[in-house]
Image (cartoon, rainbow, N blue to C red):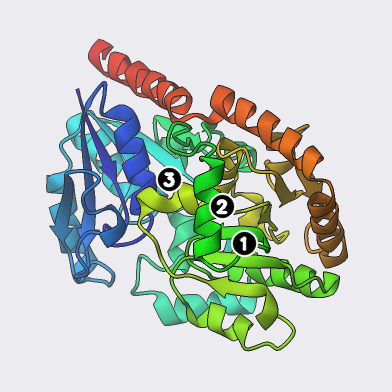
Amino acid sequence: MRVTILVPDISSNILWAATALGLSLASRFDVEIVGPDFGGGICEMYRDAFPYVAVPAKRLYRLPDFLWERRRLIKAVTGDVVIAVKAYADTLPIALHAKRSKRAKAVVYLDEWDAANFMALPVRDRIRSWLRHAHHPLEDNYFPLVERMIPAADAVICTSTSLARRFRGSVIPIGVDTEVYCPQDPEQTRELKRALGMAEDRLIVFGGVARPHKGLEEIVEALATLGDESIRLLVVGPQTEFLQKLQRVDRYAPYIVCIGAKPKKDMPAFLALGDLVVLPQRNTLLAQSQVPCKIFEAMAMAKPVIASDVSDLADILKDCGWVVPPDNIPALAKAIAHAMAHPNEGEEFGRRAREKCVREYDRRVTAEKLVKVVEALADERIRE
C-alpha cells in the first residue's frame, strides 16, 4: 500500500508538516512526499529527513502555465491513498484527480484556515486581490474556491477543533517526539546558560523564525511593561528584519537576545534554557484555527506555559498551564510576573504538562490515529 503526501511547495517550511506525516506513516506504508519545485530545491531544514520527490514546476504559479505544469504533479502521484497537505490549487485538486482517474482515496490535511486572511479583508480589497492575481492560482484569493472541493475528499484531518467544525473533519493533533523533547540535564543547562553569558537571567525562550504573527511583539511589550531587565526573551533563530525592528525600539532592546539559528537536533538543549514558554496568539480568524506545535514541544520539555485563550489552547493547558485573554498586554505581563514569582507552581504545571503530552500528544499516539484513518481508507478501496 503506497501513500502519496502532496505539499504545495517543496522548498517552503510547510514541508515539516508533510515530513511529520510521512514519518508517522512510514512504519506501516510505502510513503512518498511529492511537491512542486519552483526553483529553490528541497527545503534545507528538512532536506535529509525523507526521500522527497521534487517535481520541476517553475511556472506552476501562473496561468495558463499552471494548466500543463500540473500534469507533472499528476504523473508523479502514485499512491493508493493521496494526502493533500493544505487545500491549495496544487494539492487538493491533484488528489481528487487521482481519486477520479486511479481510484485512489483522497485525504486533505489542514493545519490552519488558509483562506482566513483573505476572508477577513473588506469586500473591496478582495475584489482588488482578484483583479491583481486572477492569473495566479496559488494566491490567497483562490483558497476559498479550492476549499469548496474539500467535501469531495474521502477524509479530512484537522489539527484544531475549529477547523474540524468548519470542514467537517476529525481532529488529530500535531504530535511531538517526547523522547527527543524531554527534560534535559540541569547541570548541562546551567553550563550552556553560563556560556551564553546569561547565568543570572530568567528566560522566555522562542525557537524559530521571528515574524510578526508569532507573538514576539506582545512578549517584549509585556516585559517592557514589567520593567524587570532580569527577565529576557531569548530568540533561538535567524536574525530577521522584524526582529531587528523590535530591537531598534529603545524600550524593547534590553529584553531581546538573539543567538541565531541552531541545528534542529540541538533545539531541546536550547529550549531547556527557558524558565517559561509564552505563546500569545492574536484573536484573528487565522489564529482561531491554529494550534502551534511549540505548545507541545514546551509541554514535552516539562516547561511552564502561558498561552492566549484562542483556538484549543485553553483545553490543552487545562490544569497544566496559565491562560490569558488574547490581545491583553496587562494580563500577559501579570501572568509572566506571577509565573516568575512562583517557580514551584510552574514546576508542577510543567510536570503535569509533560504527563499529558506523553499521554495524548506523543508522536506515536498521533501516528496511530493517522494509521487508522489510512488503513480504513485502504480497506474501503480494496472492497470497492
- N-terminal of the two: label 2 or label 1? 2
Q: Position of residue 259 (x, y in %)?
A: 48, 70
Relative to the observer, which residue lies in front, 273 or 333?
273
Q: Secondary structure at mark 1?
A: loop
Q: Position of residue 294 (x, y in %)?
A: 55, 49
Q: Is residue 242 above or below residue 372?
A: below
Q: Is residue 202 left or right of residue 20?
A: right
Q: Which residue is mark 3?
A: 149
Location of residue 321 in the rendering, given as x and y in whole percent from the top left corner: 75, 40
User: Could you tell me how far apart the alpha carbons at marks 3 and 2 are, in whole angstroms?
Assistant: 52 Å
Instruction: Measure the C-alpha gap from mark 1 to mark 3.
Output: 54 Å
Q: Amino acid at mark 3?
A: Met
Residue of label 2: 190
Looking at the rendered structure, the kind of residue marked 1 is: Ala
Question: SS for tag 3?
Answer: loop
- Please give the residue where the numbered disc 1 appears in the rendered image: 199
Question: Whole-Å distance between the Cαs marked 2 and 1?
Answer: 7 Å
Q: Residue at x 30, y 40 (%)?
A: 96
Q: Quadrant of the N terminus?
A: top left
Residue 160 at x, y = what percent? 59, 40
Q: Identity of the amino acid at label 2?
A: Arg
- Give the secondary structure at mark 2: helix
